[in-house]
Amino acid sequence: MGTTDIHNFFESELHVGTITQVEPLPKAHVPAWVLTIDFGPLGIKKSSARITRLYNAEDLIGQQIIAVTNLPPRQVGKVISECLVLGLPSSDDADTEVVLLQPERPVDNGTRVS
């Protein structure tokens, strides 16, 4: 991987949001949830996330996550994904599930990662 400068890094806007709704992604080849996320002053955004094996819908509601919020919308199946929820692989195996990046204590929705 190459290096980047600090200005390019800060062009990505990473914000905290709270998951308010979770639905299955219709007819997905790989099972995924459609997350509705409240980013406070930035508004409500949707994102598709392939996290169904580690997270059930009921447990995700109310969870805070970190997402890139300034990417262009992307069509994922029948859903427009408006942000990219961030996570880490659960092990070194490339085919493992993703563990969500989350603040370790509650913060205001829309808070920018700094």
Image (cartoon, rainbow, N blue to C red):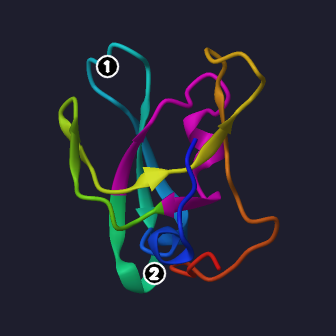
Residue at 61% x, 14% y: name it.
95
Q: Residues within 10 Å of mark 1 (few under 14, many from 20)?
A: few
**Label drawn at residue 103:** none
The residue where tag 2 is placed is: 40
Camera-nearest residue between 112 and 22? 112
Q: Which amino acid type corresponds to the residue marked 2 in the rendered image?
A: Gly
Q: Quadrant of residue 108?
A: bottom right
Q: Give the residues drawn in magenta, as a range.
A: 46-67
Residue at 62% x, 44% y: name it.
87
Residue 13 position within the rendered picture, expressed as x and y whole percent measured from the top left: 46, 72
Camera-nearest residue between 61 and 77? 77
Instruction: Assign the C terminus to one quadrant of the image.
Output: bottom right
The residue where tag 1 is placed is: 28
**Spatial separation of the CA atoms under disc 2 and disc 1:** 29 Å
Residue 64 position within the rendered picture, expressed as x and y whole percent measured from the top left: 63, 62
Q: Locate residue 22 relative to residue 90 in the image: left or right.
A: left
Camera-nearest residue between 73 and 114? 114
Instruction: Assign the N terminus to one quadrant of the image.
Output: top right
Q: Is residue 42 above or below residue 34?
A: below
- How many marks overall? 2
Q: Earlier in the sequence, mark 2 or mark 1?
A: 1
**Residue 64 is inside the magenta segment:** yes
Residue 92 position within the rendered picture, expressed as x and y whole percent measured from the top left: 76, 22
Residue at 43% x, 20% y: name it.
31
Q: Quadrant of residue 102?
A: bottom right
Q: Is residue 48 above or below residue 24?
A: below
Q: Is residue 54 above or below residue 39?
A: above
Identity of the residue furthest to the right in this view = 104
**Residue 85 is inside the magenta segment:** no
